[in-house]
Image (tube, rainbow, N blue to C red):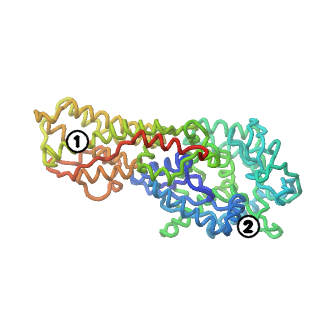
Amino acid sequence: MNKKAIITSALPYANGEIHLGHVASTYLPADVTTRFLKLNGVEAYYVCASDDFGTPILIQSEKEGKTPTEYVAYWNKRDYEDFSAFNIDFDYFYKTSSSENIAFVQDVFKKLNDSGHIYEKEIIQFYCNNDKKFLPDRYVKGICPYCKAEDQYSDLCESCGRVPDEITDPKCSLCGEPPTKEKTTHYFFRLTNFGDSLSKWLDENDHLQKDVKKYVQNWIKSGLIDWDITRDISWGVPVPLSGANDKVFYGWFDNHLAYISTALKFLADKGIDGKSFWNSADIYHFIGKDIVYHHYLFLPAMRLGINSEYKLPDYIPTRGHLTLQGKKISKSRNWYIGLKQFLEYYPADYLRFYLVSINPYSQDDLNFDWDDFATRINSELIGNLGNFVNRALGFTKKSFDGKVPETTSFDEKDLEAEGKIKNLSNEVGSLLEQNHLDRALKKIMEFSSFFNQYFQHKEPWKLSPGTTNCVFLSVNAARSMAITLFPFLPESSQKIWIQLGLDGNVKDSSWSGASELKILSGHVLGDSFPLFTKVEITDIEKHKKNLGPSK
C-alpha cells in the first residue's frame, strides 16, 4: 500500500443544497476510503471544493439580488456544514473561484496553448432572442443524437453518458423557445491529439473498472471530438489572452483542475511540496457515472497536454445514481431528501450504514427506499450489531462488575472465535482496498452475527466453565468491531470505544490492531448504554408522505 494518497470527489455545484443522491456515489465512499487509509498509516488527504462558476449561478444570483461571489459564498459554507453534519471529514474544502485556482487554470491553459493543443475557431452557437443571450450548454435541452433520450442537456446526455456534438430539437431551457444560431469565436482544446495516449493510459491502469474502461475505449475508437472550452458569459475564469473578448472558461475546463490547485494550497499551508507529494501519492477521484466522459477523457488529456506535470489518477471509483422510492430524484417535483433534512430525522450513522449497504462498486443504480431503510436499521444495525455490543458489554458490567475476567484453556468454539478476530482486519481490509465497501461492511456484520451466535451458544449467564473465555473474547470482538467500523460509522465506533473504557479516540488506532486481543484480563469497562434507537414505522410513513407535490 502506497503510504501517501490524495482523495477527491466530484465537486458540489454551488447552486443548491446537498441531497442524498449527492452523497451516495461520491462523498461517502471517498470518506470511508480516506478513513480506512489513515487507519493503515497512510498520509491521506481528502480535499474538495465548491464548483462556483457557470450560467446557472449567474442567473440565480441575479434573481436573488446577490452578486455571484456572495451567492457562491453562501452555498460553499452551507454545503460544508451539511457535509460536516454527515461526518464527511474533508481535510480541506475550498472553492474553484479562489485566486489560487484561477491562477492555476490560466497557467494550465497557457501551457496547453504554447504546446499547440489550443486553437481559435468561429462557431455557430445557440442564441435566445427572447432572453437576449448566448445559451451555454446547460440552457439548451433536446434529444440526444446518440441514444435518442429526450430532455437532455446539450453538453451531456445523462442517459448514455456521452457528450453530444449537437443536440437534436433544441429548446431554450429558460423560456422553452427554439433558439437561433449566431456566430461567435471560441477556443478549443485538441482532444483529438490524445486518442492514442489516452488508450495507452487506460490499458496500463489496472485499478480502473473494466466495464468503464471498455466503453471509454469504444468512445475513443469511434472518434474523439475537439472540445469547446470557452463561453460567452461574465462569471468564470477569464481566458488569459489578448483579444479573448471577455470570454471565460467552460466550467468543466476549470473545475477538475481545482482537485490539483486545492491540494497544492492545502499542502503548501502545511509546509509540504505539493507537486512532489501529488506525483508520489495514489490519486483517487470518486465520481458518479454521469461524468465518466470528463474524468476518463478530458481530465487525463489535459494532464497529458502539460506533459503529465501532475500525474493522472490511479483510481476513479465510479458508481451509479441514487433513485428515491424507485423514481429519479427531482428537486422541482419535490422528489428528493435534503441531507440536512434527513439528519434532523436520524443520526448520520444510520444513513451512512444504509447507503454503504445498498451501494455496490459498479455503475448500477441504487434505490433509497424508506421501508427498506427501516428494516435494515432495525434488524441489522440494531438487531445484530447493537444487540451484540449491548449483550457483551452489558453482561460484563452486570456479572463481573465491568472487569474483564481471567481466561482458562480455550475450547474449539473459543478457538474459532479467536480466529475470527485475528482474521478480521485482513478480510475487511482486502475488500476496502478493492473498493468493495458494501462487501466490507457486510463482512463486519457477519462477524457480529457470529459473535451473537457464539455468545448464545456459550450461555455465559449460567456462569458455567468457559464463561470467562466467552466474556474475554466477546469484549475483544467489540473492540475489533469499533476499529473496523470506524470508516463507516465513526460516531457509533467511538461510542463502543468509550463503553470499552479505552482512552483517546478510535481513529488513532491501527487497522491491523483490530485483529489483536488488546483488552486484557483485569481491564475495567466504561458505562454501558444502547448504541441505537429503533426506527418507528409511523415516522417512516410520515416521511414517505412528505415526498412529491405539496398537497
**Which amino acid type is shown beneath numbered disc 1?**
Ala
Give whichever of discs 1 and 2 has the lower sequence position.
2
Question: Which quarter of the image is occupied by the C terminus?
Answer: top right
**Which amino acid type is shown beneath numbered disc 2?**
Pro
In the image, is residue 456 above or below residue 224? above
**What residue did someone put label 1 on?**
392
The residues tagged by marks 1 and 2 sit, at their Cα atoms, a distance apart of 62 Å
In the displayed orientation, state which residue is furthest to the front. Answer: 551
Q: Residue 161 versus residue 397: which sits nearer the camera?
A: 397
Q: Residue at point 17% right, 44% down?
A: 396
Viewed as shown, does residue 408 lie left or right of 31? left
Other residues around mark 2 within 10 Å, as few (<14) / some (14–19) / many (≥20): many
Disc number lying in front (1 or 2): 1
The image quadrant of residue 502 is: bottom left
Viewed as shown, does residue 464 lie left or right of 317? left
Residue 145 % position (x, y):
79, 39
Residue 218 % position (x, y):
70, 36
Residue 71 % position (x, y):
63, 65
The image quadrant of residue 413 is: top left
Viewed as shown, does residue 48 lie left or right of 527? right
Residue 238, labelled with which disc? 2
Other residues around mark 1 within 10 Å, as few (<14) / some (14–19) / many (≥20): many
Q: Is residue 252 visible?
A: yes
Count every numbered label the image shows and give the total: 2
The image quadrant of residue 58 is: bottom right
Q: Residue at point 76% right, 44% down?
A: 164
Q: Is residue 309 visible?
A: no
Residue 119, labelled with which disc? none
Q: Residue at point 62% right, 38% down?
A: 212
Secondary element at tag 2 = loop
